[in-house]
Image: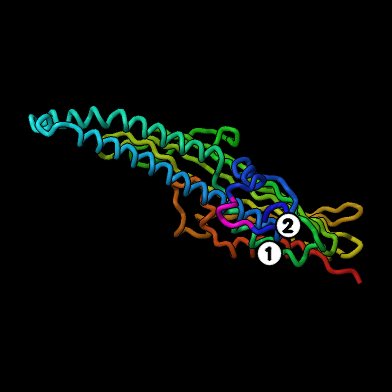
Amino acid sequence: MDRQGNVLNKEQYIGAPIERAHLHRGFSSKKTPIKWIRFFRACVLQREIAQEQKSKRIKKIWFILLGVFLCNFLSIPLNFISETIGAFFGVIGMLTCPGLIVAGIMTYLTNMKFKKNFTDGFDFFADYFSALFTLIEEDLQLDSRIALEANVKDTVTEENLIKNESYTSESRGFISGVEKNYERVISKGSCFFNDESLIFFQFSERTRERIIKKRGSSGKRKTKHKYRAAYPFTIKMKIPKHKYQLNPSIDTTQISFAEDDEYYVFKVYRKFDVKKENPAQYNPYEESSISSFAVDYFSLEVINLINTCYSCVTPSA
């Protein structure tokens, strides 16, 4: 929808200024669950439309190159071409090389412009968080808003590097190795429930990159980049004391507990790991593996974390 509440069609999404402004740098905002779902959909559709426009532009560039080549080729006298096969290919080379260079530069610039204005990541938020916000919507206060901050930048960058150390292996042909660990907060947010409980959540991506140099059976040296990604989801819940009382025993092996004058404070943690939980989908050569988790699986696991916190208290009489 636009600011006046009118429904936008797919073509009009590309011109929605608020959503488009967030596509590259991420976002930080407060919205009701239904508005978050509309926001995610707008972002995804905008990127899809921009992707289609980019593909059409690149095809147009190469069709123009082909057309210029054909026009120049057909204008060459046939007797000139038929003199020698070498001359024939020489003419083709003279005609195509400059065109290929120009087309290659224009394609590169088109891709860079798209990457500057749009980025990956909103498909993830649209699927995972839309499902989660739908599940908790009935537990929120009337017209309550969910504060959500998101970072859709890449994780494997120098600014996210937290550890860099050498790596060794006894595998055949191993020469040298480096292991780098990165961490990025994908999103964090908060909201109030109907019972005045306050929930904070944070979702992170931890990526381990191994850069291995080894010598193959043929003696040729190779460099491989292998990744292992895990996704910790942390929930901190502040449950009001005037509405709940603490259960006599709390299993502190799975939950952290503290309290202040007004709240019981619980902190629980769940780490999603594709290699352990969905090994068939694990690919060591992909930086990110979050899309390998089913949406319903993710949402229900987060709901289980919330229920774990509530299991530590009982409603006051």
Farthest residue toward the left? 83
Query: Is residue 256 or residue 158 the one in the foreground?
Result: 158
Who is closer to the viewer here, 49 or 245?
Answer: 49
Query: Who's the residue at 71% across and 56% down the image?
Result: 268
Q: Which residue is mark 1?
A: 134
Compared across the picture, whether 50 is left or right of 315 comes to: left
Q: Secondary structure at mark 2?
A: loop
Q: Residue at x 45, y 48 (%)?
A: 284
Residue 62 percent coordinates (x, y): 35, 40
Residue 241 vertical placement versus 106 (above, below): below
Residue 12 inside the magenta-drawn segment? yes
What's the residue at 28%, 29% (across, down)? 97
Q: Is residue 131 left or right of residue 215?
A: right
Mark 2–mark 1 distance (CA, rounded to whole Å): 25 Å
Q: Secondary structure at mark 1?
A: helix
All told, the count of numbered labels is 2
The span picked out in magenta is 8-13
Which x, y percent locates residue 20?
62, 45
Residue 136 visible, this orientation: yes
Q: Amino acid at mark 2?
A: Ile
Identify whether 64 is placed above or below 136: above
Quarter holding the C terminus is bottom right
Label 2 belongs to which residue? 255
Q: Quadrant of residue 301?
A: bottom right
Tell me which numbered mark, 2 or 1, is placed earlier along the sequence.
1
- Disc sitting over residue 55 in the figure: none
Q: Amino acid at mark 1?
A: Thr
Residue 185 appears in view = no
Q: In x, y percent, where is residue 153?
A: 58, 41
